[in-house]
Amino acid sequence: MNPPVPATRLIVYSGGARGEWRVLSVRPVRGASLPEVARLAVTSPPVEPSPQSVWSLRGALSNVRYITRPEQTELQTRQPPLNRPEANRAALIPIRKSHQWWEMTQEERREVFEEKSHHVRDSMKYLPAVARRLVHSRDLGEPFDFLTWFEYAQEDAEVFEQLVMHLRRTAEWEYVEREVDIRLARE
């Protein structure tokens, strides 16, 4: 049994009839989708998801993985914060990777993640237009391994589309067995 996650590190994305984000679309990219919903709420305990939620996905903020100290420093310098007033668009992209991915060592995953896919290096050019938060779900027994949250201004929507298209063409994405793309608007 896994130890409990401290509440301050837990993020819950709940789809249903309530939430600060209006759902524009729920689209399966690979594997099964999630049910269509009208709204999305993003909460952290002690706030509980609404009992009327159709689905809830939990993830924990965790230590940074697969990047070097210089890469981390550059990301921290260039990436904008979440909840910027102008960031009125968002995407929640839950991903589950294959058994083959998890059988690799961390060093082997780093090789695919950065040395072959250039995930960090190539993603830098999309900053500061897009802000991102990654939470880990695999060790919580959730249906996805990662929940990636992106925020951007409506005028940066094309920049975000380019980022997503680029990432989906990398060697890393060959290991994705389930991905759902949820697009959102804040009004």
Image: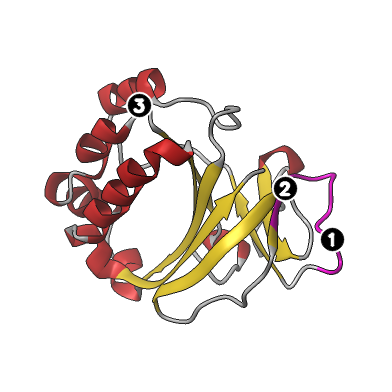
Name the spot of residue 25 as percent of width and height, x first.
53, 66
Q: Which residues are magenta?
A: 40-52
Q: Residue farthest to the left?
A: 116
Q: Residue farthest to the bottom?
A: 32
Describe the element under mark 3 as helix, strand or loop.
helix
Residue identified by numbered label 3 = 75
Residue identified by numbered label 2 = 20
Q: Is residue 33 above or below residue 169?
A: below
Specify the quadrant of the image occupied by residue 95.
bottom left
Amino acid type assigned to the residue bearing label 3 in the image:
Leu
| N-terminal label among 3 and 2 | 2
| N-terminal label among 1 and 3 | 1
> Callout 1 environment at 10 Å: few (<14), some (14 to 19), or many (20+)?
some
Asked if residue 33 can be seen in this view, the reply is yes
Name the spot of residue 20 as percent of width and height, x first.
72, 47
Describe the element under mark 1 as helix, strand or loop.
loop
Residue identified by numbered label 1 = 50
In three-dimensional space, the C-alpha distance between marks 1 and 2, rounded to whole angstroms, equals 13 Å
Q: Is residue 9 above or below residue 29?
A: above
Residue 49: in magenta span: yes
Q: Is residue 167 above or below residue 150?
A: below
Describe the element under mark 2 as helix, strand or loop.
loop
Specify the quadrant of the image occupied by residue 139.
bottom right
* Labels in figure, total: 3
93 left or right, relative to 83: left
Amino acid type assigned to the residue bearing label 1 in the image:
Ser
Asked if residue 146 can be seen in this view, the reply is no
